Image (cartoon, rainbow, N blue to C red):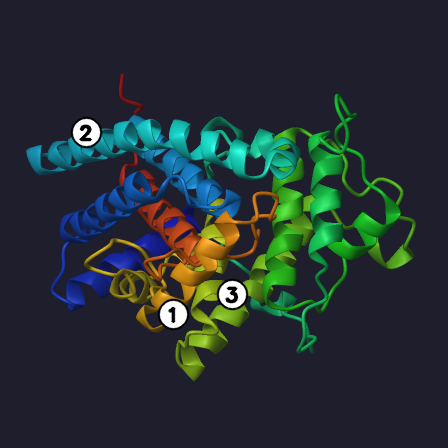
């Protein structure tokens, strides 16, 4: 906890140097999230499952922020009121978005239905930093991630691999894949997500059956810390090289997932500014590519003529050129910033009635 407070103090110092107060930054975050909520209200019928999950992560963090809002000045209470309004707007949109998911891809909806409620997602109650000494000496340059295997491993954890299936099943291929070292980018973030979903589902021992001598003392927390320490290195490298269209999505996804895992050093003030600048001021989404709008409209029309076409999980570009996935991870990450700033500035942490 002390380390986390020192990190927050450093964040506040950076904000002060830039001429910003924490209240002003929270205003910026809430303004951005309000635009994101407007985007969901307009596009709820078209956002894919990953997109809905990102907004549900935002909802979980907003509800926690409202519950733990610091007892302070009227400005803060006005911000709390804005957050309460956001929660209500998101609640109204979710019913429509989830109904559309169920209709568009019933099999995929059934397999991941447990994730489609904000109550599944646990918000961190304590924080810790990553550890640079855990960074891999060398990492693969290409993904070691198989989407079909990853989906299967998650359904085995969730118990949705068949009707009324047993949850918390860990097969050897799943364990070997999810504990493999040296994986980059999305492979790394999905390894972390596997352990986080297992924990939230209540699976008591994801490492049972691992007989490797080199992993004898490894715990689920050990893996989470290794993964986020490497995801931190990835983000630092991305910033050093300069954000590009190819790297910005994984950059924000790493902030979202590792922040949700309780690693506070992902909530850097300058990284927040990078995210805020990426939002489309007109539509409220992230990752908008105007050059593909006409092409996407044609693709959408073609998709409508194929009623059994599977909704692509990893990404969906909407008719207005917006990225469903990047918008989802961005609003989820912003919700994490809000919750972290509020939780850590209030020493008493008195819940509100």
Residue 326 seen from this side: yes
Tell whether 41 sits left or right of 24. Answer: right
- Which image quarter holds the C terminus? top left
The crowd level at tag 3 (other Cα within 10 Å; few <14, some 14-19, many 20+) is many
Residue under label 3? 232
Q: Is residue 39 above or below residue 323?
A: above
* Residue found at the very far top of the displayed protein: 353
Residue 70 appearing in the image: no
Cα distance in 3D space between marks 1 and 2 = 47 Å
For marks 1 and 2, give the one nearer the viewer.
1
Under circle 2, the secondary element is loop
Q: Earlier in the sequence, mark 2 or mark 3?
A: 2
The residue pinned by badge 1 equals 292
Tag 1–tag 3 contact (CB < 8 Å): no
Say which element carries label 3. helix
Q: Distance from label 1 to label 3 (Cα)? A: 31 Å
Please tell me which residue is depicted at 80% across the width and 43% down the height of the picture. Answer: 207
Q: Above or below — where is 326 with respect to 63?
A: below
At mark 1, the secondary structure is helix
Residue 90: percent from left, percent from top: 32, 33
- Where residue 118 appears, as percent x and y from the top left, is 46, 31
Considering depth in this image, is 109 or 336 the residue closer to the camera? 109
The disc, 1 or 2, on the residue closer to the chain's N-terminal end is 2
State how far apart marks 2 and 3 are (Cα): 33 Å
Q: Residue at x 75, y 44 (%)?
A: 153
Q: Earlier in the sequence, mark 1 or mark 3?
A: 3
Which mark is on residue 71? Answer: 2
């Amino acid at each position: 906890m002390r380390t986390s407070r020192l990190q927050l103090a450093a964040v506040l110092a950076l904000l002060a140097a830039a001429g910003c107060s924490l209240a002003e930054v929270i205003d910026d975050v809430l303004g951005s999230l309000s635009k994101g909520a407007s985007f969901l209200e307009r596009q709820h019928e078209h956002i894919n499952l990953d997109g809905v999950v990102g907004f549900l992560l935002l909802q979980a963090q907003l509800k926690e922020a409202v519950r733990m809002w610091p007892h302070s000045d009227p400005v803060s209470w006005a911000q709390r009121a804005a957050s309460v309004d956001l929660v209500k707007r998101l609640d109204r949109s979710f019913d429509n978005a989830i109904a559309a998911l169920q209709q568009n891809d019933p099999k995929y909806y059934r397999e991941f239905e447990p994730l489609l409620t904000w109550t599944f997602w646990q918000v961190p109650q304590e924080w810790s930093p990553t550890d640079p000494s855990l960074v891999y000496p060398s990492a693969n340059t290409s993904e070691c991630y198989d989407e079909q295997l990853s989906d299967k491993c998650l359904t085995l954890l969730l118990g949705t691999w068949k009707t009324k299936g047993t949850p918390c099943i860990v097969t050897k291929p799943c364990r070997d894949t999810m504990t493999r070292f040296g994986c980059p980018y999305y492979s790394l973030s999905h390894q972390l997500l596997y352990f986080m979903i297992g924990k939230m589902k209540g699976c008591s021992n994801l490492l049972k059956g691992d007989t490797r001598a080199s992993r004898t003392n490894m715990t689920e927390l050990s893996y989470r810390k290794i993964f986020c320490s490497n995801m931190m290195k990835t983000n630092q490298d991305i910033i050093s090289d300069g954000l590009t269209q190819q790297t910005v999505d994984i950059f924000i996804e790493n902030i979202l997932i590792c922040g949700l895992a309780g690693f506070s050093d992902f909530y850097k003030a300058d990284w927040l500014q990078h995210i805020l600048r990426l939002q489309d001021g007109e539509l409220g989404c992230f990752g908008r590519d105007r050059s593909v709008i006409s092409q996407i409209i044609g693709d959408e029309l073609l998709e409508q003529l194929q009623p059994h076409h599977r909704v692509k999980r990893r990404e969906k570009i909407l008719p207005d050129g917006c990225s469903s996935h990047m918008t989802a991870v961005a609003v989820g990450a912003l919700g994490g910033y809000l919750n972290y700033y509020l939780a850590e500035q209030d020493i008493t942490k008195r819940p509100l009635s």
